[in-house]
Amino acid sequence: MTVLVAFSSKHGATEEIARSIGEILDGQGLTVDVKRIEDVDTVLPYSAFVVGSAVYMGKWMRGARKFVDGHAELLARHPTWLFSSGPIGPLESPGNDSFDVADLVAATRARDQQLFGGKLDKADLGLAERALTGALHVPSGDYRQWDAVTAWAIAIARSLTAEAVAGPAR
C-alpha cells in the first residue's frame, strides 16, 4: 500500500509534522511519499492519503484547499486522513476553537482529522507578519504535540495494515 502524505506549509512547522507522520508510517512497513501539495503531479499511484495544512486566519492554505477540492472525489474513494497545524498557544486558549474543517471532512469522507498546535518563531516572519503578531500579542513558541502526532500516525498505520491483511472492502 502506497500512502501520500501531502502538505501545505508556510514557515515549515506543518512540513515537519508531515515528515514525522511519513517517517512513522514508513517505520510501520508502509510505502510513503511525503510531498508539498504543489509538488504532487498525480494522485493516481496512491491507495491512501494523509493531507495537512497550516491554518492561517482560521483557514487552510489556498493550495491545500485547491488540492482537496480538485481531488475530493478520488480522496473520498480511498482511506484519507486530514490534519491541521496552526493554533499558537495552548489549544484550549480563547480563539483556538474557531477553526472548522467539517466541509473538508465531508468532501473527502476523511476517516479522521486532527488539529495540532503550531509553531511561531518571529525570526522566520516577514515585516508585515511580525507587525501583525506583535499587535495581536501572539506568543512565540512551539506548541506542536509530538506525542499526539506519533499516536495518530501509528493509528493510521494500524488501520491501513489491518485493511491490507483483510483485503479490499469495496
Image (tube, rainbow, N blue to C red):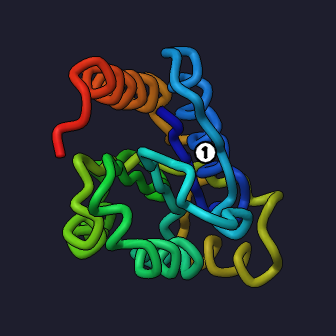
Q: Position of residue 14 (x, y in %)?
A: 59, 51
Relative horizontal placement of residue 123, taking residue 36 as reference (left or right): right
Q: Residues within 10 Å of mark 1 (few under 14, many from 20)?
A: few
Q: Which residue is at a point 25% across and 47% down the rendered structure image?
A: 112
Residue 21 or 170: which is nearer the viewer?
170
Q: Position of residue 96 (x, y in %)?
A: 32, 61
Q: Is residue 103 above or below residue 80?
A: below
Residue 22 or 149: which is nearer the viewer?
22
Does residue 46 appear in this view? yes
Q: Which residue is at a point 46% across and 80% down the rendered structure image?
A: 70
Q: Which residue is at a point 34% across and 29% down the rendered structure image?
A: 160
Relative horizontal placement of residue 149, taking residue 170 as reference (left or right): right
Q: Quadrant of residue 110?
A: bottom left
Q: Is residue 74 above or below residue 152?
A: below
Count of labels shown?
1
Q: Is residue 133 above or below residue 158?
A: below
Q: Which residue is at a point 44% across and 32% down the rendered structure image?
A: 149
Q: Position of residue 3 (x, y in %)?
A: 51, 40
Q: Is residue 68 above or below residue 19?
A: below
Does residue 98 appear in this view? no
Q: Amino acid at mark 1?
A: Gly
Q: Which residue is disc 1 drawn over?
A: 141
